Amino acid sequence: MESVMGSGACWWEEMKRVLRGVGKEWGDVVDDMECVEVVPLKGAMTNQIFQINWPTINGDLHRRVLVRIYGEGVDVFFNREDEIRTFECMSRLGHGPRLLGRFSHGRLEEFIHARTLSAEDLRKPDISALIAAKLREFHQLDMPGPRHVHLWDRLRRWVKEAKRLCSPEEAEEFRLDGLEEEICALEQRLTCSGHEIGFCHNDLQYGNIMIDEETNAITIIDYEYGSFNPVAYDIANHFCEMAANYHSDTPHILDYSLYPGEEERKRFVSTYLGSSDKRTREEEVERILKDAESYTLANHIFWGLWGIISGIVNKIEFDYMEYARQRFAQYWLRKPSLLLLDVHSP
């Protein structure tokens, strides 16, 4: 186990004590940590995650648990205690894995017996429909806290942090000095009293969505960036993530030719609305489609800033800065047409 997870880490012994405590609660695992198998799981861009396989006493079964090691510098992006409260609340509401234990640099989670989706899965109509229905259910969860939009204040905080961390050359490249003005202008243009506010995941990439292939049940995991926001922003985030494949040879490269076309987006939104008790109306579908397209601009700024900051504070092997360049390139490319669409829409 040490050779896989790094025995020199200061949290190592603490994590093992927590893991042993979980094992005692189970009461049926082999009392020898050397028998525990550790399997690194790929695809996480903020944390390191491992699957723990612990043999049981009878020898033909394993207990499984997921270990999440928090990435460096992530406190820039969110409050860990808030994220843990969200995690526990989701568990109580029957969504996502249970929290099994915590240590200073990470936590132990229930291992979900389901398959993480692939980039290709997002484009399959049957799986996309399951995701749309699940997302509607997710947005309607009765989560604690005031139902006000967190997006804009978060973006402004991240701009300040990016300016603090970046070199003058990087700040000039990413136009950071003018970005607060861009954010304020977007907020003014996109904020509307008619926008539905729900508890949003805000990171709906394929690696955060799992499917039980026996029951077709969808589980949305990893709530680090979760907050109340316009639901159209979350849908826009999911559409933007269809351009990514984080398990390719170049995981930081985005292919926007894969961004879903109008019919694919319309099918997703129709299913999303159809999963609620309200009757789906054509004008409602069109409104969310328009709003989601406009909110892709805020998504590009969000993940562009995330890439800049992560490139400085995070040691995970991923070309964060190039990722940020692509997100900002899309922002400047799409801004004229999308804001013109916003102006001329009824």
Image: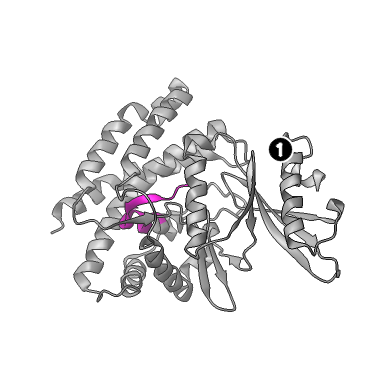
Report x, y in % for residue 110.
Answer: 63, 59
Task: Give above or below for 149 relative to 214.
Answer: above
Viewer-side residue, 196 vs 128: 196
Q: Is residue 118 visible?
A: yes
Q: Is residue 317 left or right of residue 287?
A: right
Number of numbered tags placed on the structure image: 1
Q: Quadrant of the C terminus?
A: bottom left
Report x, y in % for residue 37.
Answer: 80, 56
Q: Is residue 234 magenta?
A: yes
Going 42% across and 73% down the picture, which residue do you hit? 129
Residue, disc 1: 11
Query: Among all residues in the image, which is located at the extreme top?
Result: 168
Q: Is residue 244 visible?
A: no
Viewer-side residue, 272 vs 95: 95
Q: Is residue 239 magenta?
A: no
Disc 1 residue crowd, few under 14, some 14–19, many 20+, Cα 10 Å: some
Task: Give above or below for 52 relative to 184.
Answer: below
Viewer-side residue, 230 vs 79: 79
Report x, y in % for residue 287.
Answer: 22, 62
Viewer-side residue, 94 vs 161: 94
Q: Which residues are magenta?
A: 223-237
Query: Among all residues in the image, which is located at the extreme bottom?
Result: 214
User: How is the protein colored in the picture?
Assistant: one colour
Q: Amino acid at mark 1?
A: Trp
Task: Give above or below for 6 relative to 243.
Answer: above
Going 32% across and 32% down the picture, which residue do you hit? 179
Q: Is residue 333 left or right of residue 23?
A: left
